[in-house]
Amino acid sequence: MKKRFTLLLCFVTVMAFAKPKHEYYKLIVYHFSSTQQEQTLDQFLTETYLPQLHQSGFAKIGVFKPIANDTAKDKQLIILLNHNNLEKLSQPVQWGLTELGSYNQPIYNRYEQFLLSAFSDMPFMKIPDAAISKTDRIFELRSYESPTEATYRNKVHMFNEGGEVKLFDQLGFNAVFYADVLFGSKMPNLMYMTSFSSIESRNEHWKQFGESATWKRLSSMDFYKNNMSALHSQLLKSTTYSDY
């Protein structure tokens, strides 16, 4: 009995310190329309929410705003969290947020949350090269919807086993993450984020991708036909208080 207990204790200890095989992501998207709302959100994130997240174990937190915010009616602020513990990602958004705003003066119009699981070919986030300043760096957040669950799994296969992730890496897209969307507003769906030194660099990278012999071969394969029904792309800039 004592030997069995010792073996069980050793197993639990090993599992507790075992290196995680992949991580999860949480995207929080605030929708707002006024300068006052934006200022209040910025202040809340800077003074309350991000410090709380840092204290609870989130080392690097990305906070972004779409470049299109300047002219958009539906303006957005996007927070990206990563962790290998799902329980950490389930922590509430409203640390101190419930005390702000009112019926007549809401601090946001709506917010969305997305829970994601990292792809097998890139199981952990890669923080962009610090040599490129936050003021210059461009991020692209892409979302691919599929018509059915089967075609969605086929598109994920195209990224991993098919070699699309490897191609992005070879061409220097500087991916931050690739992930399955486990919960979100548009399903089935995958998301990924890449980073570039400028918009011109982003455009040149996509030109090289489209001209790549690898992509032409992949996209012409019958096995990967009709596995995507919608593509959404946003170009983002880091906020001044983002960790990257």
Image: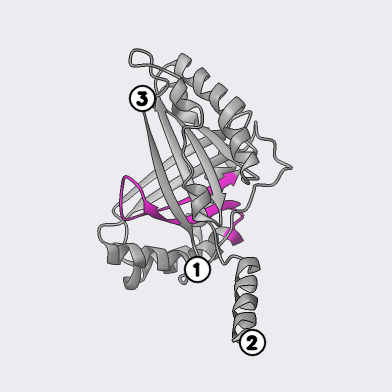
Is disc 3 placed on a helix, strand or loop? loop
Instruction: Determine the image quadrant of residue 162.
Output: bottom left
Q: Is residue 203 depicted above or below 150 in this figure?
A: above
Instruction: Determine the image quadrant of residue 51.
Output: top right
* Label 3 vs label 1, nearer the camera: 3
Residue visible at 55% across and 44% down?
A: 202
* Label 2 vs label 1, nearer the camera: 2
Is disc 1 placed on a helix, strand or loop? loop
Q: Is residue 163 depicted above or below 41 in this figure?
A: below
Callout 1 amino acid: Gly
Is residue 64 rendered to the left or right of residue 147? Answer: right
Residue wearing tag 1: 163
Is residue 71 rendered to the left or right of residue 208? Answer: left
Whichever of callouts 3 and 1 sits on the residue coming sooner in the sequence is 3
Mark 2, other Cα within 10 Å: few <14 / some 14–19 / many ≥20? few
Residue visible at 49% across and 43% down?
A: 91
Whichever of callouts 2 and 1 sits on the residue coming sooner in the sequence is 2
Residue visible at 60% across and 81% down?
A: 5
Q: Which numbered marker is on residue 109?
A: 3
Is residue 219 in view? Answer: yes
